[in-house]
Every structure is written in structure tokens, then in C-alpha cells.
Image (cartoon, grey):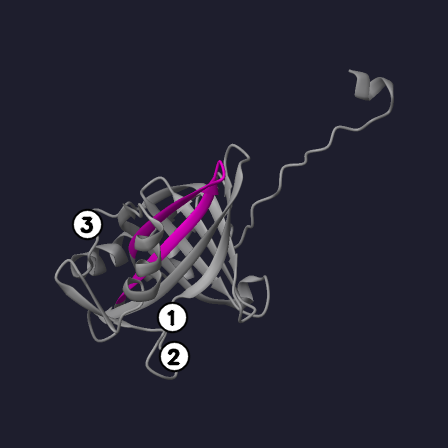
Amino acid sequence: MFSKLFGKKDTNTKPKAPEIMGLYLGGSFELDDLNLKLIEPLLTIDGAARQHIIQAVGEAHLDTGGKILRFYTDDDAFLQVVLDGGETESHITDVKLWYFYETKTVGSKQQWDQLINEQVSTPLYTLAGNTFNRVWDAIGDESPPVAMTEKTYELDGDVSETDQFVMLYEREINAQQSETLLVSAEEKIINNNHDRCLVISTGFDVLPADIKING
């Protein structure tokens, strides 16, 4: 009322979550059922949903100049879109659907340091009886985790940041396709305390044509 009397305009100061391919915070999408039926028996995941509601959106800028967008869904999954050189759909280089496999709390600074230095990045990583090969290899004997900061936008307007130290792994599941493993040591400051965890996710490639935007 007072803003109207004195000529002030109400402004919406909530930061806007990134959007692309018709994907946006609060929206939904559907995946091609036939393709999932063909590939799912070969994957670590079981019972992947066909329809997803986007409950949060993450954004991380890479040192290479690229960007990662993550659309977190109601099925413990996130659709990840990687862009390089720009913000439009023509700059998309990779689209994957990821499912969270396991999250473990890191209880001490010593455990955190050991995780970063010894456990996130190894030449091979075994999960559920399958062996994955490290994708991001550096020149020399050591391939340290890749550091990035993800800004996450939630439906209630909350925005938070998480520092992540990640490594990517891969294994062939047939002549044309691979399953990908993401190992991430994640750290967030909550009430001046460090909240740390190890997050393991598995993913697979999704073609943009296999994604139907429901609105």
C-alpha cells in the first residue's frame, strides 16, 4: 500500500535460475521410454523414471570457459547439460542423465584431506562389481580432482553454493555406449561449519531429441 502511495515499485529480487532446451526450475520433462528400456538393463541404475519434475537447478562455470547446468529432479536424478563457448543450444556439447548412487558424510578434516588427495581420483574405480576407467588424466603420475563451485537455485527461492572436487570415470556397456561415473567430494558452509560429503553418481548419454518438455 505505502509503495503505491509514494510511487515505489515492487521489485522481484529473487535471482533467476538458468534455463535451456525448455528446461527450467519448476518445469518437467519426459524421456523416451523405448531408449531407456534398451539401455537400462546394462546400467548400474534400476527403475529410472520416465517423467521428471525439476526441483532445483545448478550452475557451475569451468576453467575452460564452459558451463555445466544441472536440473535436479524428484527421482534422485539430475539432467546435466554441458555448454562450451556460449549460452545457447548450439553450444551444447553433452547431455547426460545422472542418478545418485551413494552419499557418505565426511566427519573430520583428516578424512576430507585423504578423500581429496587419495580417493576421488584413482586410475580405476570399482562400483557395484563394475570397473570404470578414469577419463580426466593429466600429464604425469598424478591427476588431481577438478575443482568447481556450483550455485544451486531451489523452488523456494533459496540460493546456495557448494565447492566440489570431482573426477569422471567411464566403462563401455556395448559397442556404441558407455556408462559414466562421477565421484565428487563436496563442501558447503552451513552456520559457519563445514558440511562435507562424498557423492557418487552414475550417468548415461541422452540425446536432446529423446527429451520431451512437458512445461
Identify residue type, mark 3.
Answer: Asp
Q: Are marks 1 and 2 in contact (CB under 8 Å)?
A: yes
Would you say residue 207 is visible in this rendering? Answer: no
Foreground: 184 or 12?
Answer: 184
Disc with the residue nearer the chain's start (1 vs 2): 2
Residue denoted by label 1 = 144
Residue denoted by label 2 = 138
Indicate which disc residue 46 carries: 3
User: Which segment is the magenta one?
Assistant: 179-201
Quadrant of the drawing holding the N terminus: top right
Foreground: 161 or 105?
Answer: 105
Q: Position of residue 73 (x, y in %)?
A: 38, 43
Disc with the residue nearer the chain's start (3 vs 2): 3
Q: Is residue 185 magenta?
A: yes
The Cα–Cα distance between marks 1 and 3, rounded to whole angstroms, is: 31 Å
| Residue 124 image-quadrant placement | bottom left
Q: Residue at x 49, y 36 (%)?
A: 191
Q: Residue at x 21, y 76 (%)?
A: 175
Q: Is residue 38 magenta?
A: no
Crowd tier of the residue under label 3, counting other residues whose Cα lies within 10 Å: few below 14, some 14–19, many 20 or above? few
Disc with the residue nearer the chain's start (1 vs 3): 3
